[in-house]
């Protein structure tokens, strides 16, 4: 018997309370081990359109709907008795006549929700909106996986109805139509060979997976929210398993599954290369912890492969290698650097401000590890908008040389210097510490970190794999990867299907960014071709007269989400910095929801609402998100604006502040509330338009 679960089952399971989920999982195990157990009350649904649908009893109220045909059993849905039966009455499991993929198809004749365009004559009549797919031949639509029964509705869809239509179609058909709607030409599904198992088609593997044993089923049902551990899109799978002859990068806007691809890539490399060492890494310890937890789910059934994958932040990796090979690491704080810069500027007669000197040290001299006047004279100051003549640079170099001397006297290192020394040491060795490196959130990798990665694994096939989004760059200045020996041209792919964020939230958040973003090397990332595969409520943007009114409104909004059935752990509240956290705490207290304030050490939990800064939101996701305190001097942060050493740097500040708000907004899956107090941030005008 082939025992499978469908993604519709894991989705419906995730909507149940925890106690009911436990009962469902127990019943699922019973079904896998022995379908004939009397307690299951297993019986065929005589009223369903598909005669192969059966019902299994979980308890007095809950029922599992399964599809049973010959040697194939598929868990399809779970819900209360009447809800489960209605779900089965509206669907059938069939093989698509063109693609050969197994599909769960919703019956067209019972669907009432799709608004069909109706034009009523009147004295003033708006022109009808153009039909998006009316001119496409049936064969082309069938090649995208559109069920035969839905061709008629597809032909009359316009821009107002296409999203509602997509909710009722198999995922490959919905995604293709949404791509067509935004002017893209999707690739048709490859037809299965004659006689092939319809469940083995790549489109079917996205929604049905064989469970080989009870342990594998338990793992699949333990974290139903993390469906990516079981189901992977064919486009993602192609990137995971591709052979690259040099460094490669996958990009895409928030929610398109870049981290999913990175984790699967690390697991694939470990399973495909026994004996080799894999590093899965990112820029912060918090994100590394999240990667480690998700990887654990993925490689649970293959502990040997898992043991070959190290998961740590880049700083932690470098610190550990440095201490093992070169000795203790004593890092200089930013306050010490500030003092050394100030002391170095005394007596030089420089007219440059202390802020300019500090940022010139951090972003140019230290970042690129410049150790001589000649190196500083010749460096291309990418990301520094104020131009400096050779004479000006010559007047500044004694300041920076003084900082370097001060650090040596105190036995201190900067992070960039730690990476630099370690990189030079590893370059002399025959065997690097890792054979393959997978980097998540690659847009925030620094110059020194990229040099380190290039030496570790940049000179071999499949050595470096990056996942990132330029629109989420919030920490690092732009610089040329190619100049450091990491050339991804020709090996850069963009993911365009958004699984995490509703269409309504994604389109609003995208207004904060340019439709096209290019890196220093000319690699282009387009955002206007991205499509979301599900709908949700329209995001709310509100501005209040005072903080008390804002907190009261947020409290009411949070209370409403809990009343709708959301759990505290499915909600996040974020502010620009810790200075505004008190407003968030006050609002959450008003809703009586248990909460936890996140920091670098404390991570989200399932039983508490998360409160944190926008920076800490990176890598997290919630069903509902509130972004609070978006006031005019909060975002963009006034202290950053005031610290600008040159007017030309203002653009960079505004870009990264926009990116930060984008990151916070796109943590939301279904519900988003953005608030501020008058005068509000100018960025809210973009969100509201």
Image (cartoon, rainbow, N blue to C red):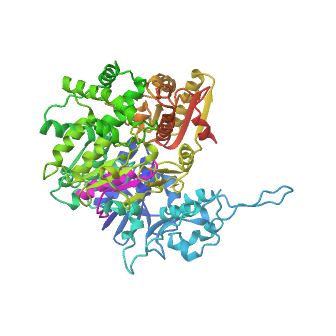
Q: In which quarter of the image is the N terminus?
A: bottom left
304 left or right, relative to 391: left
Out of 365 and 543, give the one closest to the viewer: 365
Q: Residue furthest right?
A: 123
Region in magenta: 242-269
Q: Can residue 604 be seen in this view?
A: no
Residue displayed at 43% across by 32% down? 609
Q: Position of residue 23 (x, y in %)?
A: 36, 47
Residue displayed at 57% across by 71% down? 149
Out of 389 and 268, give the one closest to the viewer: 389
Out of 260 and 222, give the one closest to the viewer: 260
618 left or right, relative to 33: right
Compared to 646, does 381 lie above or below? below
- Whether residue 254 appears in magenta in the rendering, the answer is yes
Compared to 362, does 291 lie above or below? below
Compared to 664, does 81 lie above or below? below
Q: Residue furthest front?
A: 391
Q: Which residue lies furthest to the bottom in this view?
A: 194
Q: Position of residue 630 (x, y in %)?
A: 54, 30
Q: Position of residue 664 (x, y in %)?
A: 47, 38
């Amino acid at each position: 018997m082939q025992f499978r679960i469908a993604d519709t089952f894991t989705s419906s399971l995730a909507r149940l309370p925890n106690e009911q989920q436990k009962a469902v999982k127990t019943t699922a195990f019973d079904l896998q081990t022995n379908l004939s157990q009397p307690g299951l009350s297993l019986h065929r649904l005589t009223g369903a359109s598909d005669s192969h649908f059966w019902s299994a009893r979980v308890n007095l109220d809950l029922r599992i709907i399964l599809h049973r045909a010959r040697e194939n059993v598929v868990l399809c849905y779970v819900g209360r008795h009447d809800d489960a039966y209605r779900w089965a009455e509206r669907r059938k499991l069939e093989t698509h006549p063109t693609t050969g993929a197994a599909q769960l198809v919703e019956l067209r004749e019972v669907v009432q929700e799709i608004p069909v365009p109706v034009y009523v004559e009147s004295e003033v009549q708006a022109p009808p909106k153009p039909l998006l797919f009316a001119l496409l031949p049936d064969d082309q639509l069938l090649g995208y996986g559109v069920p035969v029964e839905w061709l008629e509705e597809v032909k009359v869809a316009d821009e107002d109805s296409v999203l509602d239509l997509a909710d009722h179609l198999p995922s490959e058909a919905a995604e293709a139509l949404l791509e067509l709607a935004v002017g893209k030409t999707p690739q048709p599904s490859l037809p299965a060979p004659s006689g092939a198992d319809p469940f083995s088609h790549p489109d079917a593997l996205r929604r049905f997976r064989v469970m080989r044993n009870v342990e594998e089923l338990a793992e699949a049902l333990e974290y139903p929210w993390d469906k990516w551990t079981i189901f992977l899109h064919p486009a993602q799978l192609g990137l995971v398993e591709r052979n690259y002859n040099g460094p490669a990068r996958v990009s895409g806007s928030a929610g398109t599954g870049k981290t999913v691809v990175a984790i699967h890539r690390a697991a694939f490399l470990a399973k495909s290369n026994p004996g080799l060492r894999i590093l899965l890494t990112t820029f912060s310890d918090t994100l590394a912890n999240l990667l480690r937890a998700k990887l654990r789910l993925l490689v649970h059934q293959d502990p040997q492969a898992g043991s070959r994958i190290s998961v740590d932040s880049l700083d932690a990796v470098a610190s550990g290698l440095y201490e093992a090979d070169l000795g203790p690491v004593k890092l200089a704080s930013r306050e010490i650097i500030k003092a050394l810069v100030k002391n170095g500027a005394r007596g030089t007669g420089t007219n440059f401000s202390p802020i300019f000197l500090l940022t010139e040290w951090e972003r140019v001299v230290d970042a690129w590890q410049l150790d001589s006047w000649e190196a500083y004279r010749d460096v291309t100051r990418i990301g520094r908008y104020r131009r400096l003549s050779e004479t000006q640079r010559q007047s500044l170099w004694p300041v920076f040389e003084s900082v370097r001397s001060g650090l040596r006297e105190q036995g201190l290192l900067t992070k960039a210097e730690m990476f630099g020394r370690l990189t030079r040491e590893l370059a002399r060795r025959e065997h690097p510490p890792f054979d393959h490196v997978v980097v998540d959130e690659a847009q925030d990798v620094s110059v020194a970190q990229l040099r380190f990665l290039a030496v570790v694994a940049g000179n071999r096939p499949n050595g470096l794999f990056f996942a990132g989004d330029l629109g989420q760059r919030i920490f690092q200045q732009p610089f040329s990867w190619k100049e450091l020996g990491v050339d991804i041209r020709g090996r850069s792919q963009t993911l365009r299907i958004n699984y995490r964020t509703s269409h309504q939230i994604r389109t609003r958040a995208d207004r904060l960014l340019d439709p096209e973003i290019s890196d220093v090397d000319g690699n282009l990332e387009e955002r206007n071709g991205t499509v979301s595969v599900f709908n949700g409520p329209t995001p709310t943007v509100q501005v209040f007269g005072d903080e008390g009114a804002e907190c009261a409104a947020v409290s009411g909004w949070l209370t409403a989400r809990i009343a709708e059935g959301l759990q505290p752990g499915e909600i996040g509240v974020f502010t620009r910095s810790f200075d505004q956290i008190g407003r968030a705490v006050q609002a959450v207290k008003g809703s009586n929801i248990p909460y936890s304030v996140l920091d670098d050490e404390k991570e989200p939990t399932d039983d508490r609402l998360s409160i944190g800064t926008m920076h800490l939101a990176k890598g997290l996701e919630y069903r509902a998100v509130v972004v609070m305190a978006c006031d005019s001097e909060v975002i963009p942060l006034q202290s950053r604006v005031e610290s600008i050493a040159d007017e030309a740097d203002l653009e960079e500040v505004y870009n990264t502040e926009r990116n930060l708000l984008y990151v916070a907004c796109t943590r939301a899956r279904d519900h988003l509330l953005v608030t501020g107090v008058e005068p509000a941030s100018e960025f809210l005008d973009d969100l509201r338009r």
